[in-house]
């Protein structure tokens, strides 16, 4: 038999040959993928914020390792199936909007778990789940700094005492910065960004000023880096 015949026979076997995995190995792979999918389901349910939690998305992430592991098993069977899978997956487009960017992390975690389990690297998949869980717990324990408050003041322009206002802000605020000033119809509106541990006393003193027509304090619900 020539080298050409050997190459032809090997190509034919790769095109039409079946997988070398036994039924027991296939069941083991799918079982591990299913267990790790349930683990991701539990972690996402416990760690996700209630405002962004979606059970449908969580169920999708739980079933994804099982489906991808099955695809990996099928792709190991022969070359035609591998090419067919690549072609089929390349034309799929997912347009579902992700509400929380952290969901992308869970989606990639779920996909990578299915790929790793599908090739039989059970220890790596288990270590990945443990490390990801520890990482999420540690990052969740890091507190976010509170965003500064916004102080909105309205006063008649001719009665505005900027020096007195500046003195009052320095007395009660750790930090303050004027962000906006608008003058219209003889009335001045100021927006001041501030950080103060004596906010109630500051508002009481401002509201006691008879020249002030309106005093508002707006708290920001967002997150701040520092």
Image (cartoon, rainbow, N blue to C red):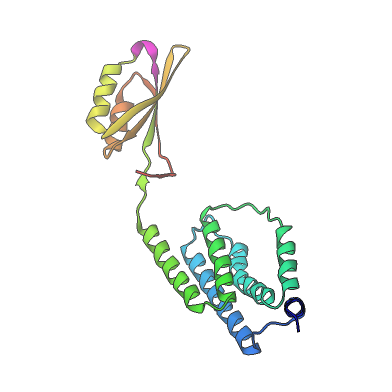
Q: How many marks?
A: 0
- Residue 137 in which image quadrant: bottom left
Using the image, determine if residue 30 lies above or below residue 179.
below
Specify the farthest residue to the front: 2
Using the image, determine if residue 213 lies above or below residue 26.
above
Quadrant where the C terminus lies?
A: top left
- Residue 195 in which image quadrant: top left
Quadrant where the N terminus lies?
A: bottom right
Q: Nearer the viewer, residue 92 or 53?
A: 92
Percent coordinates x, y for residue 146 in the rendering:
36, 44
Specify the farthest residue to the left: 171
Q: Residue at x 62, y 69 (%)?
A: 64
Using the image, determine if residue 199 lies above or below residue 3.
above
Q: Give yes or no for residue 191 being in the magenta stretch.
A: no
Q: Nearer the viewer, residue 109 or 38?
A: 109
Percent coordinates x, y for residue 179 in the rendering:
40, 26
Percent coordinates x, y for residue 94 in the rendering:
68, 56
- Residue 27 in which image quadrant: bottom right
Q: Residue at x 27, y 40 (%)?
A: 197
Q: Which residues are magenta?
A: 154-159
Left or right relative to 1: residue 20: left
Using the image, determine if residue 151 lies above or below residue 49.
above
Left or right relative to 219: residue 77: right
Q: Residue at x 74, y 63 (%)?
A: 88
Percent coordinates x, y for residue 12 in the rendering:
77, 78
């Amino acid at each position: 038999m020539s080298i050409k015949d050997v190459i032809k026979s090997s190509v034919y076997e790769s095109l039409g040959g079946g997988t070398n995995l036994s039924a027991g190995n296939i069941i083991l792979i799918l079982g591990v993928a299913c267990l790790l999918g349930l683990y991701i389901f539990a972690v996402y349910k416990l760690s996700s914020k209630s405002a962004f939690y979606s059970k449908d998305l969580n169920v999708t992430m739980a079933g994804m390792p099982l489906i991808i592991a099955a695809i990996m098993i099928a792709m190991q069977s022969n070359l035609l199936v591998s090419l067919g899978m690549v072609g089929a997956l390349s034309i799929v487009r997912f347009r579902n909007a992700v509400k929380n960017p952290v969901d992308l992390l869970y989606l990639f975690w779920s996909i990578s778990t299915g790929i790793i389990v599908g090739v039989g690297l059970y220890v790596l998949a288990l270590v990945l789940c443990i490390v990801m869980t520890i990482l999420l717990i540690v990052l969740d324990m890091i507190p976010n700094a509170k965003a500064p408050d916004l102080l909105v003041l309205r006063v008649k322009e001719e009665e505005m005492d900027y020096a007195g206002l500046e003195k009052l802000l320095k007395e009660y605020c750790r930090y303050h910065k004027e962000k906006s000033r608008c003058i219209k119809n003889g009335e001045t509106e100021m927006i001041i960004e501030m950080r103060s541990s004596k906010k109630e006393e500051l508002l009481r003193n401002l509201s006691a000023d008879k020249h002030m027509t309106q005093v508002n304090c707006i708290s920001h619900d967002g997150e701040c880096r520092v």
